[in-house]
Image (cartoon, rainbow, N blue to C red):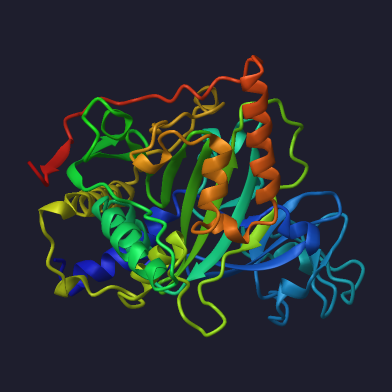
Amino acid sequence: MLTKEVNETMTRIGPGTPMGMLMRRYWHPIAGVAELDENPVKKVRILCEDLVLYRDRSGNLGLIDEPCPHRRVSMEYGIPEQEGLRCPYHGWLFNHEGRCLEQPAEPWDSTFKDRVTTKSYPVQALGGLVFAYLGPAPAPLLPRFDLLVWENVVRQVGVTVVPCNWLQCMENSLDPVHVEWLHGYYMDYVWSRRGRLPRQFQAKHKRIGFDRFEFGIIKRRVVEGNTEEDDPWKVGHPIIFPTILRIGSSGNYRFDYRVPVDDTHTLHLTYSVYRPGIPLPPQQSVPVYDLPLFDDQGKWMTEVILVQDFFAWASQGAVAGRDREHLGQSDIGIIMFRDLLREQMELVQQGQDPMGTVRDPSQNHCILVPQEEHSYDARAAGRTASQWEGSRVLVTPERFSPIQSYVRDLFQQAEVRGAGGEALLPAPDFPSYPEGPHHRQVQLQP
């Protein structure tokens, strides 16, 4: 367990807090690019700061403080100009650097505008997402992780705001055993009450392990029916520090971003990438859809796998009371993650870059990270990719997707071409990291 004081330090992410200082050293996704097609101005809240994201008429992105520095009117209702965003109240115009370009009601020869600025942060678009950096200059490079830059893929983004602190969302990713129970035993219970039994996860965990690598922690597992020579242990899948989970296999991959909105809310972006193995035209727009938490009766939609996670996180309270928990041996991943957070906070306080910081452009063309290509889920054995896509829609976020039938059709096309002898595009060559000096593991069953 943690003391109340340490729990406060680990969870509070406002300006000037130790964790807030660490979080501000990373780029975070704040919106989908497609959202600005519908409305070029969007209010965002991240790391306890209220800001306005906009795209001006030249196509430039900006992220500035929500209140106009003149009379504190919200810039959420601002007017995009050729350069910058104009306040709707008195027409003051600000560019993406926060400089005031015009003050229409002031004397023509006034220099007042040159002495007025508003808070601004750098933003970049990549892979259909808009990323923001709220830390000190010089900003590191926005990491070009593989899912963000691959060609011949289809992408989509599911968006949810979960009513709890970011840390309980991330700790879930360091807890392999919950899959067996929350998404297996409990899932079976939920669906059996509906007269169906999808059997989401049947295998029991025999062994779990965790290794540090340059971008975070690799999670490994052995379940009944697998050995240490199988992908789930030999390769594993990563938690990209500090707020990203990477999962998927067989042409269907995903980043789950857990972006701290404030101390009691987390923006969850389900960034799905589909690689059917056939040439595809460039995707003109990456669709963004809402992933709801509750059904029409106001109950958690616990028949959906990801909403089961959301429920488990939020039911711990807005901020989990870690001073009252009792951790066991199977919680070694959570303990390792907390140790890593403390270590990285100390590095930042010493003026150093935290882990995963990218500053060399030559190392940022396409960053491949470990990914088990063959899932530990025995249900996938013997199924084609399109059959897998079709069966999973009922219980995954894709049930709310506007393009899932199109995705399934692409996998079916790939199967037909492959069956006809056509060579498909090769699967990604993911790196693997051997068990290292930071390896932690526990044997759960003989």
Quadrant containing the N terminus in the rendered view: bottom left
Question: Against 437, is 406 above or below?
Answer: below
Is 141 on the left-hand or right-hand side of 18?
right
Residue furthest to the left: 446
Quadrant containing the C terminus in the rendered view: top left
Q: Does residue 133 appear anywhere in the picture?
A: no
Question: Against 50, is 257 above or below?
Answer: above
**Point 32% across, 74% down: residue:** 319
Compare residues 269 and 309 and report the one nearer the observer.
309
Q: Does residue 80 appear anywhere in the picture?
A: yes
Is 323 on the left-hand or right-hand side of 263?
left
User: Residue 133 at x, y = what percent?
Assistant: 54, 51
Question: Against 270, is 3 above or below?
Answer: below
Residue furthest to the front: 195
- Report the number of numbered marks: 0
Is 66 on the left-hand or right-hand side of 396?
right
User: Residue 27 at x, y = what percent?
Assistant: 51, 48
Asked which quadrant contains residue 399, the reply is: bottom right
**Point 58% across, 62% down: residue:** 159
**Point 30% across, 74% down: residue:** 316
Asked which quadrant contains residue 295, the reply is: bottom right
Residue furthest to the bottom: 297
Compare residues 8 and 148 and report the one nearer the observer.
148
User: Residue 103 at x, y = what percent?
Assistant: 84, 70
**Point 53% across, 85% down: residue:** 297
User: Residue 355 at x, y = what percent?
Assistant: 35, 40
Is 7 on the left-hand or right-hand side of 318?
left
